[in-house]
Structure formats: structure tokens, C-alpha cells
Image (cartoon, grey):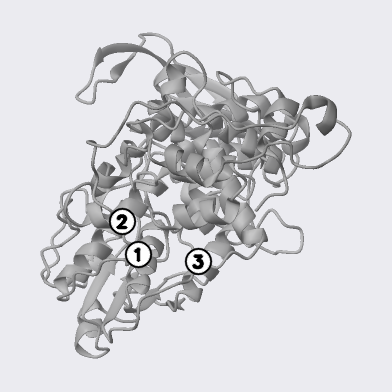
Amino acid sequence: MADVDIAEVTNKMQVDRMKRVPVREQEPKVRATNFEEVCLGYNEEEAMAEASRCLNCKNPRCVGKCPVSVPIPRFIEQVKNGNFAEAAKIIAEASALPAVCGRVCPQERQCESQCVLGIKGEAISIGKLERFVADWSREHNVDLSETAPKNGKKVAVIGSGPAGIACAGDLAKLGYDVTVFEALHEAGGVLVYGIPEFRLPKDTVVKSEVENLKKLGVKIETNVIIGRTVTIDELFDEEGFEAVFIGSGAGLPRFMGIKGEDANGVFSANEFLTRNNLMKAFKENYDTPIKAGTKVAVVGGGNVAMDAARTALRLGAEVHIVYRRGEEELPARVEEVHHAKEEGVIFDVLTNPTEILEDEKGWVKGMKCVKMELGEPDASGRRSPVEVPGSEFEMELDTVIMSLGTSPNPLISSTTKGLDINKRKCIIADENNGQTSKIGVFAGGDCVTGPATVIRAIAAGKVAAANIDEYLGYHHVVPCDVEIPPVSYEDKEPCGRIQLSEKEAGERKTNFDAFECGMTKQEACQEAGRCLRCDKYGYGSLKGGRAAIW
């Protein structure tokens, strides 16, 4: 509980309901020289002030747009009241990675896009509030490790990225004996190797989320390559696992197939970021080699491209984003594009590479490009880029980083009989339950969909966990010690909001005592009776069936 008075906070900060409480950030010129986190987040006062803007809507559309149905108004209400530990417990009902999601989720396209305040003003900073709660919970050691009694059933989870963590966490809470198998030497998947330190700190945020998983009783085995160290069939036949979830991600890079792409100095974004993030190339006391060069072109316009560009910039290079569509079509988050521009990344939009130029020793010396213009929309609704005749030109470069998407590594599918994949090498799984073509094997996240967001992977892991529970013959319901009466609208009398009594201004300005007198028992009951119980019916991808009672 925060030792801060709500009214005092809102008065002091002069909260404008239509405008967000600004979030603190490192100055662009400072952060462009280091790998420390850019966004500094809210403090307690700022978080409570921002939470006080929430309208607590009768129909919270923000929840419906969240892939994992985080009970957003419920946790924001707790933040507003300074009950940060309770807010953390509410978020934990739906998300195993709040500190991560609060930092890297595209909230502007999801929950915040549905905020009613956003119609005429600025939406609630839901992501920043989620981040605040998760960080506060970590710093104050809030216990979120409660689980059901063990049921003796063993489940294997392949991959320790967002999908794997979400699936393993939910199954552990339901009493399963869960083991996570990770191919790399450190758990976290794309959270560790893909996302830079300045966006997602590893030692504080990611490791803490992994430790929370271990507190639930989950075992994590690193350096285990499924398909080589052990196969899925061996997990069933020799190690006694009764179900398997595949959340192995999509780490196989794609290239353009243009001339010169095999030159020295051409990297995939995956390799470049893995060297820097997982293998700590940016730290002087690590021997990991990395070549940023002096002038770098990052080909692509997604979040990974922004990560690669901002990383190369911090390593001392002049960096260009080369993207074949216009700036408005950039698939990266608005926040990431904004930060990249502030830091000095140059955007060469409506530009497409046609050839990478090499010197006599086989190293990159430049790149041939052609200018583009937007034509008719493609199948996705985006306008297709078309070459502008006679617009060819050359860029002088010494490094090219390709950020054109990824696909799943085929190792698991090629060593597992009866596991079907599609033409993109993605595992085929039922989107409603995660079941694959192989009995007892479920899958979700990027290995099924191709590259997507962290929160989508978390949603897939949660859906799979619920259905693994069903497959193994259970129908667990997370119990509540309090009997909740059924929803009823018949006794809802028209009633205004309770207005709290306060001490006189002349009295209260002379001391630090609470000036709000609080509610009486009768007033509290009356105010609580105004709630319409909008949470009863479930939202998002988990709506219906199990979701309504989870």
C-alpha cells in the first residue's frame, strides 16, 4: 500500500482527465550513447495520478482488445487507490509477463486503441501502468506463487519464450509437474536474444519473470535441443511426459535473395541482435565479436528493424532504415519509430535494395537501391510499392542488416513423426485449442503464426494450457474463497457516486493527516452496489467456455 493520498496526488499534479501523465525518459543525446533503458516509467505519484483518469467504463472495451484479457479496469482501480500489491495479483490472474508486456506490447493498437478517453483526448497509459505495477511488485517481493496441489501429471514445454512461459506458468498453477526445455544457455527466448537491453532490461526484468516461473515449481533445462538432444517421441516414451507444448518461436531469418547478399558485412537482424543481447557484445568485458561498421543500412521497417538500427547506432555507426513503403506504412510501433528518430536514425522510405556491392576482398562497400512509389492496395489492404523508372542510386555502406521477418526452425517438425507443417514451415495447430496433428502435442506462438507480438504468444500459451488440462482429463477451476452472488440487474436503483466528506481546508493545511474521512459501512455498501459486474462474461481470445470462469 502506498503512503500517498489520492486526492493530494491529483491536486498536486493538476491531473487533466483528457491528457496523459507524461512518462520520464532518458534524453535522446544521452541514451544514444548507452544501452540503459530509455523509458524510466512512472513513480508512485505519477501512476496513481494516471490511474485516476480511468472512467471505469460500464463496458470496458480495453479488456476485449487485450489478447489475454487482463482485467484492466480492476487493476487500474487498485493503482488509483495505492493498492499496488493487489493490482499485481489481479494482473497475475491473466498474465505471466506483466513487466515484459508493459514494455514491449503494442498497446496503442490493442487495449489503448479502445479507451473511451482516446476519442476526444489521450487514452489511459495502460501499458505504463502495467509496467509500474510489475516493477513495484518485483521491488517489494510480492508473492504470486500460489498453486493447486500436485496432480502427478508431467507436461513438457519446448521453448522458454513468451508462449512457453505463459503455458508453463498456467499449468504449474493448476498442479502439473512442468519441465521447460530451452535450446540456448539462458531462459527467456526472444525476450533475451531478440529485444535490446534499452527496451527490456535482462538482469532485472526478464530474469525476475523467469524466477517467478521457478517459484511456481517449474523446472527449466537449458542447452537442450529438441530434435537432437532428445526427440518429442522420446519425451513421451522414455521420460514419461503425458503432453507436450511447442513454443519454440521463429528464429530462422529470411533474406531478399539479391546479388551480393553473401558478402562479408551482411547480417540477419537475428544474428546481430543475438550477439549483442544474449552474448553481451556491447559490454567491454565480453569477448563476443560484433561488426557494426561506420555506416549501416537496416533493411525492413518492423520492431526488429528498429531494435537493430538503434543497437547499431549505440555501437557508433551512422544508421539508415531502408524501407520500400512510406513512413505511414511502417509496421513498427509508433513509439519505437519516434525514439529511433530522436536518437538520430535516418529513414530512407520508399526505397528498395536491388544489389549489395562488394570490394575486392568481398566486404560490403555499398548498396544499389531504387526509389518506390505506392500503387494499389495488396491483399492485406496495404498499398503495394512500385518501382519508379530511372530512379536507381547507390548508397555507400560497410554493413547491411536484413530485417525481413523470420520463420520457424524446421528441426522439430522434421524429427517428429505425424507433426504437420504448412508451406511456410509453421506448425499447424488449431487456433481454438493449440492441438496439432500429433496426439498429445500442442503448439502456439511464432512457431505456429510466424513472427507476431509477445502478447499474442502469451495468449496462445494460455489457451494451450487450458486445453492440455482438458486433454489430460481435468477441468480445473481456480477457486475463490468468497462466494460471489450471481449477476442481477433487478435491484439496481438509480444512484449517484458517493462523495466523500473532507476536513476543512483551513484545518488540513496545517498538518499531514489524511483529510478525506472515508466511507461509512453504509456508504461503502451503496457504492459497491453500483457495480454492473461487467467482468462476468469474459473477453478477447479467451472468451467463452473455460475463459468465463478462469
The amino acid type found where label 2 is placed reads: Ile
Which badge, 3 or 1, is on the more N-terminal residue?
3
Dot label at residue 144: 3
Q: CA distance from mark 3 to mark 1?
A: 15 Å
Q: CA distance from mark 2 to mark 1?
A: 9 Å
Q: In the image shown, does 277 or 370 lie closer to the viewer?
A: 277
Q: Quadrant of the C terminus?
A: bottom left
Residue 28 locus on image (x, y percent): 72, 30
Dot label at residue 484: 2
Residue at horizontal 25 percent and vertical 56 percent from the top: 549
The amino acid type found where label 1 is placed reads: Cys
Residue 201 locus on image (x, y percent): 62, 53
Query: Would you call the spot at circle 3 few (<14 residues within 10 Å), some (14-19), or many (20 or more)?
Result: some
The amino acid type found where label 3 is placed reads: Leu
Residue 478 locus on image (x, y percent): 31, 66
Q: Are marks 2 and 3 in contact (CB under 8 Å)?
A: no
The residue at the far bottom in this view is 238
Q: CA distance from mark 2 to mark 3?
A: 22 Å
Dot label at residue 480: 1
Question: Of circles 3 and 1, which is in front?
Answer: 1
Q: Splitting the image into 4 quarters, where does residue 489 fall? A: top left
Is residue 426 in view from this perspective?
no
